[in-house]
Image (cartoon, rainbow, N blue to C red):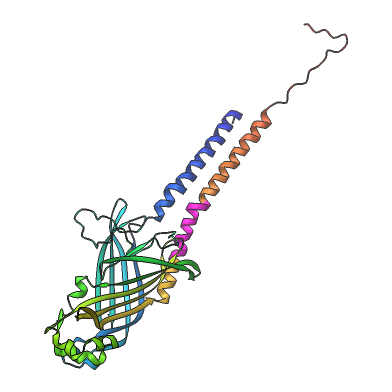
Amino acid sequence: MSARRSSIVLITMAVVLVAVATVVRFVLAPNVTKLPDDTDQTVHYAGEAMMLDSKALQSGDTAHALKSDIPVTVDRRVQVTSTHGDTAVLKDATTIHLGKQSLPSAKTYALDRESRRGTSPPASKSVEPSRGALSSAFPPDAAQDNSYRYYDSTTRSIVPVRYTGTAKREGRAVNVYEIMVSAPVKDPAVLTPLPPSLPKKLVAGLLPELDSTARARLTPAALSALPDPVPIAYQGHSTLVAYIDQQTGIAIDQTVSRTVVASTTVGDEPTSLMPVSSFKFSVTPASMRELGDKADSAGLLLTLLTDVTPLVLIAVAAALLLIYFLQRRKRQPDAPASQEPAPGESTTT
C-alpha cells in the first residue's frame, strides 16, 4: 500500500468512527430512552384493605359495616397497545384481589414517548384527560425538583408531584417523589357501585361510628333538617410515594394509599361520614428484585450507548489520526545540508 493511500485510509476511518460515535450518542441513545413500542410489564403489590359491607349497612348493622385488615394482592399491567410517531397509547390495568373477590380497573392514556407526559391522542382513540401530566411512568434522568404534575384517574384531577430526596432500592440510586390527592371522585367506574343517597334513619344509625367532627355537626336538629334520603358525595384521598431509578426512570418501588370517603352537607358544611373503601399496598419484594434487574439491564445499555461506545470510537479515531501524523512526519526528509566543492573538483560537467 502506497504512503498516500495509507494516509487516505487512516483519515477516512477516523472520520467514519467519529460519525458513528455521533450517531450512537445523539440518535441511537435518545431513541433507546423513548417508551418502547413493545412495553408490557406486570408489577405485583401486597397490602391490606378496609371495605364497606353494603349488606351489613343496609340491614342496619352499622357496627360491622366496615371490615378492616383484609389482606389484598394487586396485579398491575402496563402495556403499550400502539404507537403513532412520538405518541404511545398505553393501557394501565389494575386488578385488586380480596380473597375470592376481584376488582378490575383499566385506564387508557396517550403519552409522549420521551417525556412520558400525557399528550393529544391519535384520531378515534379515547383516553384519560391527562394532558401535560404523568400517569403511569417517569422519564429517564427524571428531574430532581417539583416540576412534574400527576394525573389521578379516580378524581380526574391533576396535582403537583413533590420531590423529597434520594434513596437506594435494589442497589440502585433512586429519586423519591410524593403525590397527594384530595378531590371529589369523578371516575364513573368508582361511582357507579356507590349509592347516591342513604336513608336518613341509616345515617342516624351511623353516628356512633363517625368521628367527633361529624357527630358534633349531626345534632338532632341538623339531622331533622336533612332531606330523606340524604344525598351522598364521595371524596378521593390518595398518597403515592414512588422510588424512581435515576438513570432509567423505572419505578423500582412504590407505596400506595387510596381512600374513598362518603360525605354529605350539614348546614352548608361538607361533612365526612365514613370511608367506603381504603387500600394500602406496596411493591412485593419479588417484583422489586425484578424491577431492579430490569433497571440494571436498561442502565447498562444506556451507559454503553451514551458514554462507553462513543468514547471508545472517538479514542480509536484519535489513535488513527495520531498514526497518520506520525507516518507523515517520518516520511518528510530532512533539509539537505549545503556542500562546498572539494579542492580541485570541478563544479561543471
> Image height check: is 196 above or below 345?
below
Residue 111 sits in which quadrant?
bottom left
In this view of the protein, which residue sits in the foreground, 70 or 182? 182
Q: Which residues are magenta?
A: 294-308
Q: Position of residue 311 (x, y in %)?
A: 54, 49
Question: Magenta includes 302?
Answer: yes
Residue shown at the point (87%, 8%) measured from the top left: 344
Question: Magenta includes 132?
Answer: no
Q: Is residue 171 left or right of residue 270?
A: right
> Image height check: is 340 above or below 108?
above
Residue 260 sits in which quadrant?
bottom left
Task: Determine if residue 275 is in view.
Answer: yes
Residue shown at the point (47%, 52%) measured from the top left: 305
Residue shown at the point (18%, 91%) measured from the top left: 220
Q: Is residue 335 left or right of residue 299?
A: right
Residue 280 sits in which quadrant?
bottom left
Q: Position of residue 314 (x, y in %)?
A: 55, 45
Seen as rendered, the residue at the extreme right is: 343
Q: How many marks?
A: 0
Q: Position of residue 277 (x, y in %)?
A: 26, 81
